[in-house]
Amino acid sequence: MRKILVANRGEIAVRVIRACRDMGLASVAVYSECDRGARHVRLADEAFAIGPSAPTDSYLRIDRLIDAARTSGADAVHPGYGFLAENEVFAAACRDAGLTFIGPAPEVIALMGSKTSARHAAMAAGVPVVPGTAQPFAPDAPEAAIADEAARLGYPVLIKAVAGGGGKGMRLVAAPGDLASATRAARSEAGAAFGDAAIYLERRLARPRHVEVQLLGDLHGTVQPFVERECSIQRRHQKVIEETPSPVVSAELRARITSAAAAVARSVGYSSAGTIEFLLDEDGRFYFLEMNTRLQVEHPITELVTGVDLVEWQIRIARGDRLDLDPAVALTPRGHAIECRIYAEDPDAGFMPSPGRITAIGAPAGPFVRDDSGAEAGSDVPIFYDPMISKLSAWGADRRQAIGRMQRALGEYDVRGIRTTVPFFRWMLAEPSFEAAAFHTSTLDELLQQRQGESFSTPNEEEEEVAAIAAALHEDASRAGRVLLDPAARWVRQDPPYVAPRGGWKRQARVEALRS
Amino acid sequence: MTLEIGTPSRARVVQIVRAEGRLRVRIDGASRPVDAVRVGGGAWSLLIGHPVARSYEVAIAESAPGELVVYVRGRLVPVTVGGRFRLRRRGATAAGAPSGPQRIVAPMSGRVINVLVKAGDAVEARQGLVVVEAMKMENELRAIHAGTVREVRVAEGASVEAGTVLVVIE
């Protein structure tokens, strides 16, 4: 393997290109029209245009991606996450074209991509699943059959799309009277989003946490699970903060949940990086939720506490290397790591996307901080794609130190021109429920509900005064028509009078002389 | 030069006296020793106070005539200059009673995936009106004030450009 085509964009394309360079491999970027000047294009060794900006015309065009790989002479394809990362047709097309797909086999993607067949695989491996429907309901299943099943499971019940993801096609039903309309809504949403209106039912657990297990599998039958990640801080079923290890998982629970994850992966012959998601109830019982057959957004925190480069291992596994990690390294967290997903969204306007040009960006750095970003000053956040611009991670010897470093890093994060979720994170990390790690998957939605749209960006008196002074200086300079654009501009305070140290000594000497 | 500077909580009177590169700043009658030096990326370093000086990095961008956004240590502070206090605090009640019809516009290009109201409906402040999908996200557009829906100008499935009026409320 010498050259890898990265079938993605933004920060994850940058992440994979960097791994290629670390390993001395050539990288090939692809780009849509609006991404011509993007950072991933400039960092790569080669770049290919694959079409107009809409994802369906470019990053989702399997034919163009395969063509770009052939033309460039790439021998492998890394899908990143999102777009075609969990598309078995793309994985198969790569294989048919003689390209190594850096991910699991297409058959495994298909098996674990269906939520109901993934549940069967988990049950067959002896892993508990959330109580639910054994078989999906066909689009023409009678309402009475769905109602019987819901009554058997007990309300509240969740309707989920078999092909679902990201909360789409999902409805919570509190009482039998709401079942029919919620079923229709879930089916219509699932049909539009995934082209598959099949649904199933799951019992709704009370106040569960989302705990997941990263794993790597090689092509020789070895599967290695990693220390768990805690991803319960979610807004509308989308993770926004992840950390590892989970503050509530004991060594004994870790041993059981990671073994369960590895058992599921082994039973389906899993290879490459993948993640098994669980719900953890208040009594410490865990239930298989689903498997993501790709690299996850939150992979950096696992890298930070284990020192294992997951993208490098994906590439090594794809070229046939044996997974020879020390299990103790993978399963023993060294310190604590937290990640915040920085989105181009305005948290003061209901997290509305905030696309546009980034006029300036001051990204945090310094001790134990990692910023995986695809954004920079002068770059555009296009309207066509996911609005995540960066993943900010911080490491500490313990959770408290990691939180302190994350707060410091968020304080330094300065993005101008567009709105970002940075102000929201500054608030969230100082929330008592976060500091106490007393949260479940609905905690953030409940907290946001309580705030009733209150701004995260309200400046304090000190900041307002400084802003007023700065604005007055700016206005004064622009009316005077000078100074502001002079790069060497400096105004020295006049009030109270500037006193040079030498003058101070002279005056002091005079005072001394008078005294003597 | 004396300026009225509007900040989110209140208006402030700022006096600037510059002579030979020396600077005197008074704010609301109090003297503030300020040392300002331009640094990279369009930002300024301000040292405020003497002999104990607080250090701030600020950047200024003009958002509209007479309106600036000032980033103070990375936090955005909207500011008006010159006695016009058209301060719009999100979440807070806008100054004065609402006048004229509300036009709910698409904040960005996208696809209408749900229309939640019809003409003649009474709506409350913050009630959801239309759901627009863009950037893989669904965004619910809400009423600013209570009123009656006069017009719904879009249908589910329609593609809309940024700025398109979707709903008019009286």
Image: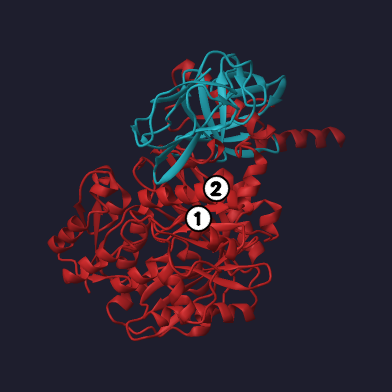
Chain colours: A red, B cyan
The picture quadrant where one finds residue A316 is bottom left
Chain at tag 1: A
At which x and y percent is residue A333?
57, 75
Report the disc number at residue A365. 1
At which x and y percent is residue A282?
68, 67
Q: Quadrant of the C terminus of chain A?
A: top right
Q: Are marks 1 and 2 in contact (CB under 8 Å)?
A: yes
| Mark 2 lies on residue | A412
Whether residue A367 is visible to the viewer of this picture, yes or no, is no
Inspect the image, locate mark 2, and give the three-letter code of the amino acid beneath it: Glu
Name the residue: 67% across, 34% down.
A462
Asked if residue A84 is positioned above or below residue A180 in the image, the reply reads below
The picture quadrant where one finds residue B133 is top left
Inspect the image, locate mark 1, and give the three-letter code of the amino acid beneath it: Ala
Q: CA distance from mark 1 to mark 2?
A: 8 Å
At which x and y percent is residue A50?
20, 51
The picture quadrant where one finds residue A27 is bottom left
Q: Secondary structure at mark 1?
A: loop
Q: Is residue A149 left or right of residue A45?
A: right
Query: Residue at the left extreme?
Result: A71
In this rendered view, identify the residue nearer to me: B60 or A6: A6
Query: Which numbered disc flags the more N-terminal residue, 1 or 2?
Result: 1
Asked if residue B169 is positioned above or below residue A244 in the image, the reply reads above
Q: Secondary structure at mark 2?
A: helix
At which x and y percent is residue A145?
49, 60
Asked if residue A326 is positioned above or below residue B22 in the image, the reply reads below
Chain at tag 2: A
